[in-house]
Amino acid sequence: MLLVVGLVPLAALFGVFGQEQVTTTVGNDAAVLAVSAPRNLRGGLLFTGRFRVTAKADIGDARLVLDPDWTDQMQVNSIVPQPRAQTSRDGRIVLDLGRLAAGRTSVTFIGLQVNPINIGRRSQGVELDNGARPLLRIHRSVTIYP
């Protein structure tokens, strides 16, 4: 019985419940989108999501569109740099980055904290749009442990 109890701290020691950053990247002829954020979290933890957009062609109205689970039962502490505008579309958060010329890169950091009652698997997809037209999409999820 003590061995089973000892496995939980051992798993935590090896990062099973930790907040190791994992980067997911997609690209096409228009742009490259990279999202770096933990895949495993615990209630109460502070973490940062990094969103890097590199334009291969001019993007007249670059927008990051985040799935609702990025902020559901999460505390948003900061968004750096501030987007030109911040709105919502069908429950998804839209961050307006403005015009992004070919060859330019925009990096946005979002500081978050997990609410202690937030437990389970959540979708944290991210879409890069040019205005309302989708360019790229990353499908990712996060597991939140008690």
Image (cartoon, rainbow, N blue to C red):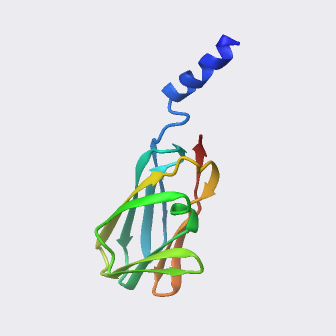
Q: Position of residue 17 (x, y in %)?
A: 54, 36
Residue 49 is drawn in which quadrant? bottom left
Looking at the rendering, which quadrant does residue 32 occupy? Answer: bottom left
The residue under the point 46% across, 42% down is: 19
Nearer to me, 14 or 60: 14
The reply, left or right, for residue 54 in relation to residue 73 is: left
- Residue lying farthest to the top in this orientation: 2
Is 58 rendered above or below residue 137? below
Outermost right residue: 1
Q: Residue at x 66, y 12 (%)?
A: 2
Residue farthest to the front, as pictured? 117
Q: Quadrant of the C terminus?
A: top right
Instruction: Kindly identify the residue that appears in the image at 57 percent across and 68 percent down.
Output: 68
Can residue 90 be seen in this snapshot? Answer: yes
Left or right of 122: which side holds 106? left
Q: Quadrant of the N terminus?
A: top right
Closest to the observer, 58 or 141: 141
Residue under the image location 51 percent in, 63 percent down: 71
Which one is in front, 49 or 55?
Answer: 49
Picture coordinates of residue 123 (x, y %)?
61, 60
The percent coordinates of residue 69 (x first, y second) are 57, 62
Residue 15 image position (x, y, % from top left): 50, 32
Q: Nearer the viewer, residue 75 or 98?
A: 75
Describe residue 13's horizontal placement relative to residue 107 as left or right: right
Question: Is 44 above or below relative to 105?
Answer: above
Quarter of the image holding residue 141? bottom right
